């Protein structure tokens, strides 16, 4: 049984704008001067001030960009930049197709947990209909997060999308990764920033993993790229 077959019922009501689509020939312009091979520095002070109020922790972040991911949302784009430490990544959402760069969201992420199911039975146990993924709330560490996608009172469907991954060329993807994901968030106490949990079943050419990432809003003013 393929992963697509396994999650066909979970994904049947996913929003059309997030559905997997064929990659467009024209790539959108990259935001905030971000690019494959660029060097990123992020002011960690705003994140250190969240200590004790968030799962996300950042002492410092000065990293080259080792890989770039791109997700076509049929009118908007998710630009993902994976840093060299293999622990931190940045996601920027832009609107306006392939002509404009209108940044509508910027989130800094860290990997929290990675599971590698050995077979379909283990995958179902981790992310299937009897798991906690897709329920209205989700607990990580000491905090409870509210589901962002889906309106069901019970478990809702995972959202499918395709990510093109660029790690050798800035214009030609090396491979595509199929995701089946769910997003949660919470407002951090005494802060205007939100903390997110993204759980994604990731089917890449040589791997199948269930990846949990913790993210916090990033102010682009705290970002420097050279």
Image: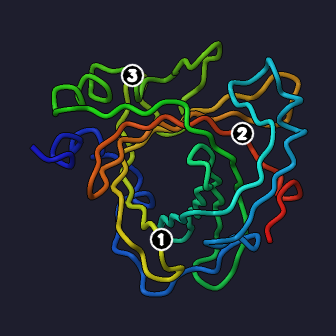
For numbered disc 2, what is the local secondary structure?
Answer: strand
In the rendered image, the residue lying farthest to the left is 1
Instruction: Tell me the distance, in whole angstroms, between the alpha carbons under discs 2 and 1.
Output: 24 Å
Q: Nearer the viewer, residue 221 or 167?
A: 167
- The residue located at (75%, 74%) in the rendering is 33
Q: Position of residue 113 (x, y in %)?
A: 48, 30
Residue wearing tag 1: 166
Q: Which residue is mark 3?
A: 154
Query: First in sequence: mark 3 or mark 2?
Result: 3
Q: Residue at x 69, y 33 (%)?
A: 195
In-image side of 158 versus 187 (left or right): left
Assess disc 2: are there few (<14), some (14-19) or many (≥20) residues with their C-alpha within 10 Å of its C-alpha. many
Element marked by disc 1: strand
The residue indicated by pointer 2 is: 216
Image location of residue 42, percent across then percent down: 82, 52
The disc placed on residue 15 is none
Figure quadrant of the C terminus: bottom right
Q: Is residue 34 left or right of residue 72?
A: right
Tell me if residue 73 can be seen. Answer: no
Q: Mark 1 vs mark 3: which is more N-terminal?
A: 3
């Amino acid at each position: 049984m393929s992963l697509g077959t396994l999650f066909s019922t979970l994904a049947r009501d996913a929003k059309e704008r997030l559905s997997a689509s064929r990659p467009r020939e024209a790539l959108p312009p990259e935001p905030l001067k971000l690019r494959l091979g660029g060097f990123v520095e992020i002011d960690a002070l705003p994140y250190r001030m969240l200590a004790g109020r968030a799962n996300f922790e950042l002492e410092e972040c000065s990293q080259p960009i080792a890989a770039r991911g791109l997700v076509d949302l049929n009118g908007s784009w998710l630009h993902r930049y994976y840093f060299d430490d293999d622990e931190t990544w940045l996601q920027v959402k832009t609107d306006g197709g392939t002509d404009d760069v209108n940044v509508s969201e910027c989130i800094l992420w860290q990997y929290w947990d990675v599971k590698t199911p050995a077979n379909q039975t283990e995958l179902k146990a981790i992310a299937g209909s009897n798991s906690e993924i897709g329920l209205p709330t989700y607990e990580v560490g000491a905090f409870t997060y509210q589901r962002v996608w889906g309106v069901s009172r019970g478990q809702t469907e995972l959202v499918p999308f395709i990510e093109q991954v660029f790690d050798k060329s800035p214009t030609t993807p090396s491979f595509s990764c199929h995701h089946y994901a769910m997003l949660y968030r919470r407002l951090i106490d005494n802060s205007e920033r939100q903390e997110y949990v993204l759980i994604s079943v990731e089917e890449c050419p040589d791997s199948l993993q269930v990846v949990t990432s913790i993210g916090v809003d990033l102010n682009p003013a705290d970002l420097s790229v050279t």
